[in-house]
Every structure is written in structure tokens, then in C-alpha cells.
Image (cartoon, grey):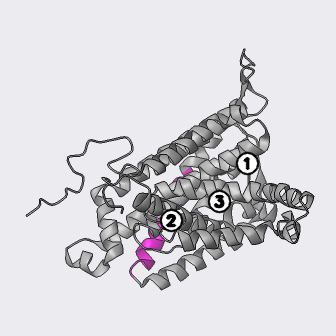
């Protein structure tokens, strides 16, 4: 009889955990994305490209944290944007009230992260004992209440206007760290902030990869497949689910802090909007649930489409018009970009039911690779 596969194994403690991409195409895509993000400030000059790259970094970590819940435990939570908002507002309120200094940044982190974890703990203990649909409804109610509260406490949060603030001098765009050298590149505070966002997001994703490939992560997958059987085997399912909820909340709050630092602003539309929750769900589904790598792919595809599809459609519409093609110029008009964005996502779900990562692992990966999660 074949030996059982060890939980944490005889595999070495790799930086990417014991779960490689298991597909040559997926590995190539991930490497290209990482290299492009690392080189964005120098390869793609301009504020828009840098903003898009920073948003990809933040949302990759945010989506990965949600995948820890949805993909690895099967729990549908609508409170994830609440934790994201807690991180954003904590750093914004601290920097707004205490001024642009590192003590304010530390205060925002020290207040925001524990608050998110405590709320996640409370939600987990009180609602993860019930059926999945009731857990989803409870998290939706809590998130809605928090959004209303943030809008009403205008003396603290700025209400619907949100809070704008300044960053410490080192992170400001006007701070030149390295003047233009012989390559013509200049490193200022804005670029330093971008690399801070990139590095912390990458570390959080690597940490989540380690978590899901640990014995704890195997238990989460067992709970996802059959909660009653996991309980019968002696696992404390409520403890594991609550712990996963707290970990996901901490990463989401950290992503919120990074987003606020990048935007120098925190408000309902950028931190607590329900549309952000829908975007996260779409990114998880597009990339592939239960993979973590899918968060990087899903965030990249979604945010690039969100920012550049309209411009590409304008070019295509103009080309079709000059070629004298009937109907196409109207169908490809930039004003219809949301329609095409929706159709693209419907097509991606239809043709990639297990997400891009699942499809690449099953059809485009190494034949010798192990089975996916």
C-alpha cells in the first residue's frame, strides 16, 4: 500500500511554500506579471500606469486573503471590505489627526490591525456555528452597518467626503531620493511608496501560500470538502474557521492601509463600497478559487481590463470605421465598454470554470505535476 502523503512533508521550507505553480505556462505568466510590476516605474512612465500597478499589488493581496475564506473553507463572507475599510480609515485618521509623521503611521497600524482581528474574531465566534447562508447574511448585515456608521461619524471619518492626509516627508512625490542618473531615471518618494506597496503585498501573498500549504491549511480544505467528517475526525472546525477569518481580516486590513497610503485618502467609495466586494468576488472566480496564485492572475486581468479596455475599444472602433465595416464601429464604441467587460467575464467563467489557474494546471501545465488543490 502506498505511503500517505505527509501534511507538511519532507519538502524543504521553500520561500514559495511546498506548492509551486505546477504549470510552465502559469509560471511564465506569474514571472512576467512580477517583472512588469517591479519595472513599472521605469518601463511605463506616467501616473496612470503607476496607479494601475499599485492597485494590482493591493488587490492581489486583498483577493488572496478572501480566497483563504472562499476557496479554502467554502465560507462566503460579505464583510471583507469592512476589514479593508478599517485599515484604510485607521491610517487615514491617524495621519489626519497626528500629522504626517511615522508615529502616526505606527498608530494607525497598531489600532487598525488589532481592531480588524477582534471584529473578525467576534463575527467568527458568533456566526460560524450556523449554516453557510446565515453566515453570509450576518456578515452582509455587519458590513452594511459599518458602512453607515462610517458615513455618519463625520467628525471622525469625514463622512461621505472621507479623509485626505499627507504622508511623511520620505514618501512624498517631491522628495528626491536619487536624482536622474545616466539612465535618465529619478527615484522619488512616490516611487519608494510604490515599492513599499509591492514588497508588503508580495510578503503577504507568500505568507498566505505558506498558511494554506501547512497542516492548518489542509484542515481548512478538509472542512471545505466535508465539515461533518472533519468534526468526526476530531478537528475543532469553529476554531479553524475563526482563525482563518482572523488571518484573512488582518491581510485585508493591511491591504487597506497600503491602499490609503498610496491614494493619500480614505473614503466610502474607495474603502467600503459594496462594489469593491463584487470586484473581489469576480477576481477570485477569474483567477481560480483555492489557489492563491489565482489572486495575482485575477487581479491583473480585472484591473487591466477596468482601466484599459475602454481605450482599446476606442482604437478598435476607429479602425473598423476607417475600414468601412458595418455595425462594428457602433458595437465597439468606447461608451459600451462596461457591456463588453461583462461579456468578457461571462465568457471567462464559461470557458474557465476552475479559473485561469485551474485551466492552466489541468491543460497547460507539466504532465508530471501533481494534482491541484
Is residue 180 in view from this perspective?
yes
Q: Quadrant of the N terminus?
A: bottom left
231 sits to left or right of 201: left
Q: Which of 342 and 136 is in front in this view?
A: 342
Where is residue 352 shown, x and y percent of the image?
52, 68
Residue that extends furthest to the left in the rendered view of this protein: 1
Is residue 95 in view from this perspective?
no
Q: Mark 2 points at which residue?
A: 355
Q: Name the residue under label 1.
A: 263
The label nearer to you, 2 versus 1, is 2
Q: Could you give the CA–CA distance between mark 2 and mark 1, rounded to whole angstroms?
A: 30 Å
Residue 200 quadrant: top right
Q: Name the residue under label 3.
A: 302
Mark 2 and mark 3 lie on one chain; the one further toward the N terminus is 3
Who's the residue at 41% across and 58% down the image?
A: 361
Where is residue 90 shown, x and y percent of the image?
63, 54
Q: In this view, does 197 lie above or below 246?
A: above
Q: Could you give the CA–CA distance between mark 2 and mark 3, rounded to whole angstroms?
A: 13 Å
**The magenta segment:** 111-129
Local SS, label 2? helix
Q: Could you give the CA–CA distance between mark 3 and mark 1, rounded to whole angstroms?
A: 19 Å
Local SS, label 1? helix
Where is residue 31 shown, x and y percent of the image?
51, 42
The label nearer to you, 3 versus 1, is 3
Amino acid at each position: 500500500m502506498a505511503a500517505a502523503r505527509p501534511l507538511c512533508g519532507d519538502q524543504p521550507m521553500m520561500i514559495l511554500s511546498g506548492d509551486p505553480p505546477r504549470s510552465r505556462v502559469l509560471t511564465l505568466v506569474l514571472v512576467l506579471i512580477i517583472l512588469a510590476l517591479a519595472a513599472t516605474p521605469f518601463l511605463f512612465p506616467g501616473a496612470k500606469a503607476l496607479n494601475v500597478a499599485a492597485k494590482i499589488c493591493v488587490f492581489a493581496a486583498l483577493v488572496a486573503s478572501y480566497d483563504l475564506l472562499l476557496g479554502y473553507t467554502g465560507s462566503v463572507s460579505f464583510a471583507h471590505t469592512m476589514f479593508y475599510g478599517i485599515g484604510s480609515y485607521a491610517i487615514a485618521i491617524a495621519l489626519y489627526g497626528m500629522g504626517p509623521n511615522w508615529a502616526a503611521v505606527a498608530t494607525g497600524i497598531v489600532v487598525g490591525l488589532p481592531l480588524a482581528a477582534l471584529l473578525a474574531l467576534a463575527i467568527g465566534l458568533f456566526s460560524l456555528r450556523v449554516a453557510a447562508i446565515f453566515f453570509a447574511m450576518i456578515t452582509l448585515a455587519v458590513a452594511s452597518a459599518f458602512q453607515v456608521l462610517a458615513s455618519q461619524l463625520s467628525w471622525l471619518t469625514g463622512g461621505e467626503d472621507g479623509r485626505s492626509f499627507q504622508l511623511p516627508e520620505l514618501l512624498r512625490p517631491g522628495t528626491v531620493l536619487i536624482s536622474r542618473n545616466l539612465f535618465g531615471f529619478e527615484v522619488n518618494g512616490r516611487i519608494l511608496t510604490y515599492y513599499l506597496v509591492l514588497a508588503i503585498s508580495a510578503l503577504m501573498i507568500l505568507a498566505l501560500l505558506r498558511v494554506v500549504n501547512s497542516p492548518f491549511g489542509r484542515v481548512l480544505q478538509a472542512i471545505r470538502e466535508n465539515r461533518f467528517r472533519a468534526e468526526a475526525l476530531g478537528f475543532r472546525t469553529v476554531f479553524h474557521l475563526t482563525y482563518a477569518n482572523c488571518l484573512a481580516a488582518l491581510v485585508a486590513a493591511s491591504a487597506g492601509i497600503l491602499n490609503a497610503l498610496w491614494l493619500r485618502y480614505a473614503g466610502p467609495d474607495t474603502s467600503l463600497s459594496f462594489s469593491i466586494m463584487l470586484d473581489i468576488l469576480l477576481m477570485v472566480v477569474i483567477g481560480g478559487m483555492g489557489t492563491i496564485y489565482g489572486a495575482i492572475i485575477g487581479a491583473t486581468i480585472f484591473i487591466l481590463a477596468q482601466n484599459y479596455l475602454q481605450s482599446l475599444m476606442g482604437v478598435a472602433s476607429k479602425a473598423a470605421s476607417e475600414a468601412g465595416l458595418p455595425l462594428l464601429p457602433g458595437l465597439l464604441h468606447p461608451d459600451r465598454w462596461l457591456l463588453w467587460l461583462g461579456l468578457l467575464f461571462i465568457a471567462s467563467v464559461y470557458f474557465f470554470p476552475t479559473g485561469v489557474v485551474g485551466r492552466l494546471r489541468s491543460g497547460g501545465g507539466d504532465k508530471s505535476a501533481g494534482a491541484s488543490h
